[in-house]
Image (spheres, rainbow, N blue to C red):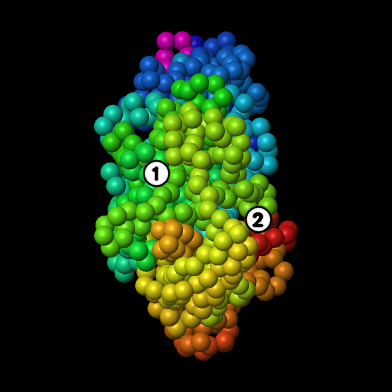
Amino acid sequence: MAEDLVLERCDLELEVNGCDHHTADLCRERLVVRRGQPFWLTLHFEGRNYEASVDSLTFCAMTGPDPSEETGTKALFRLSDAMEEGAWAAVVVDQQDSTLSLQFSTPANAPIGHYRLSLEASTGYQGSSFMLAQFTLLFNSWCPADAVYLNSDEERQEYVLTQQGFIYQGSAKFIKSIPWNFGQFEDGILDICLMLLDVNPKFLKNAGRDCSRRSSPVYVGRVVSGMVNCNDDQGVLLGRWDNNYGDGISPMFWIGSVDILRRWKKDGCQRVKYGQCWVFAAVACTVLRCLGIPTRVVTNYNSAHDQNSNLLIEYFRNEYGEIQSDKSEMIWNFHCWVESWMTRPDLQPGYEGWQALDPTPQEKSEGTYCCGPVPVRAIKEGDLSTKYDAPFVFAEVNADVVDWIRQDDGSLHKSINHSLVVGLKISTKSVGRDDREDITHNYKYPEGSPEEREAFTRANHLNKLVDKEETGVAMRIRVGEGMNRGCDFDVFAHITNSTPEEHTGRLLLCARTVSYNGILGPECGTKDLLSLSLEPYSEKSIPLRILYEKYCDCLTESNLIKVRGLLIEPAANSYLLAERDIYLENPEIKIRILGEPKQNRKLVAEVSLRNPLTEALSGCTFTVEGSGLIEGQKTVDAPDPVEAGEEVKVRVDLLPLYVGRHKLVVNFESDRLKAVKGFRNVIVGPA
């Protein structure tokens, strides 16, 4: 009788599997593979090798704390002669001396997560069990049978593998790109992402069911949307919008997700302070890309927060145009969420593709602070019955805004405001380039088109279907050049009278600092023209000077100033309102790499910035993040003070980088100048 088969060791073939599965960065010490695609293991036996006529090999793959075949979290399969598509299987690819090379296949709809793979070897009536390997299984956008399949290699590269990118901020008329280090393949991040799934309330309530449902990117996306905020659970980030961040870190100061996720794990899943919309979106993007779901951060300008789903945001103002009540419903300068690519077998055909997910806690969805996934296509078509949360996302890009002026006697007059359109310049980073891509057309049909009216009719968006009243007098806010932080500058109320009559009225101009979510700060410029006459068929530009000394102490880290013009014509009892948000440009951060970047060679980066203010800076700190930094991040303090107009310069040591393209992301902060961002691409060549 043949002696027992004894396993000496199992070689995980990390290099070849990492290369084949696009997980090389994760496969240095562990096996990480993508579902629906074969991977290789080599078994080394003591004494004799496997003999097909004598030995029977059965494998068991399990995930989760309560694995079962019924729920798809446990698979038993024998060594077979041929690979079986869409199933757990193992076949022999080579056999020499005491080694057996095997190819394993996994179903393209297997639950993702951490797996244990064991072997039962029986010879006659005797059997032995061996633990072969632990491995992590991810979604696979390279596999046509996977629900997250993307058929463009450039898009897979961008939306799954790229670790740095841009997030868009500023205002619709001055779009600002902020560099971000997603870092989904940096040390420890995959374990943190899996841990995030394992502390979600659905797992804690029923672990077996939760692990089984991890086969669906729709389910996983919804869990991640809820877990990136901490409003209902042990989630990652606490949101705060009141400019009081002393007991944490200001949302503006983060330049990557890695530091946030590591802090969350290190502190035992205690929430990290603080996040705002782009931070929530960026962390969700990191987690979803890490798990293998193609994901991108998108920014919507003039984004509506509609609580009651009536698709209407109403502002009540006094007769000077100032908003009277503190509203929870308002227009944000910009709002960020993510889109993830997946099929939607739970919905009608045509709704596969990009799905909007919003981890910023705004409204509850099925009792939890999460939002989506909802097909972007459903938003465009006005199909508000679609799962999940279509009415909320539709309102973000389509709500109507009505301004009411309350006079002294309490009567309300509708003011005409053509300057505020909701849902503009919806932006994301281009594939393979550092440019912005405008994806507004994915969310909306062209304004005034029959398709747009059909979508509004389907959504029962009555406000948008009413023809807007037109008057012969129009006003908009124009800006001049040189709107840089630290400078004085002019803005203009540009008024046109296209009627044959003369119009006389009062013009009120006011500038106030503002946060990106619409919260107004103090005034930093005003003008009141009691009598302004407009000749027939004429144009006028009225300047308003905005001084640095007026805005320097109240400008928030959003760098935004809201300019409002109100033209009152008492004779016609008419109120004409115009508003514009102005973004003040920060100074440029310059990053130089000293020496030629070669593999395995230590690098030094020189980082500098010129003080644009009329006063000295103190407490100057540069924070650098990106591939190859010790612990992923470095902070360097600069000597004080940095006088007005003077350049501040520091050097940062970098660890040797791998061959390829890397992005260094930099944040500068000081007492008077905060959250200034910069980036630099570094191309590392072979040694």
Q: Residue at x 32, y 58 (%)?
A: 406
In percent of width and height, residue 584 lies at 53, 70
Q: Nearer the viewer, residue 465 or 604?
A: 465
Q: Nearer the viewer, residue 106 or 251?
A: 251
Residue at image mark 2: 434
Magenta range: 123-129
Please report whichever mark, 1 or 2, sits nearer to the chain's N-terminal start: 1
Q: Cβ–Cβ below 8 Å for labels 1 and 2?
A: no
Rendering quarter of residue 591: bottom right
Decide: few, some or many residues near mark 2? Use Cα within 10 Å; few <14, some 14-19, many ≥20.
Answer: few
Q: Is the residue 375 above or below the residue 512 in the image?
A: above
Q: Is residue 125 magenta?
A: yes
Q: CA distance from mark 1 to mark 2?
A: 36 Å
**Residue 461 can be seen in this image:** yes
Rendering quarter of residue 309: top left
Amino acid tagged 2: Asp
**Number of on-image labels:** 2
Q: Is the residue 33 above or below the residue 344 in the image?
A: below
For mark 2, give the secondary structure. loop
Q: Is the residue 304 above or below the residue 169 in the image?
A: above
What secondary structure predominates along the stretch shown in magenta? strand
Residue at image mark 1: 312
**Which quadrant is the C terminus positioned in?**
bottom right
In percent of width and height, residue 105 lies at 56, 24
Amino acid tagged 1: Leu
**Residue 184 can be seen in this image:** no
In percent of width and height, residue 275 lies at 38, 56
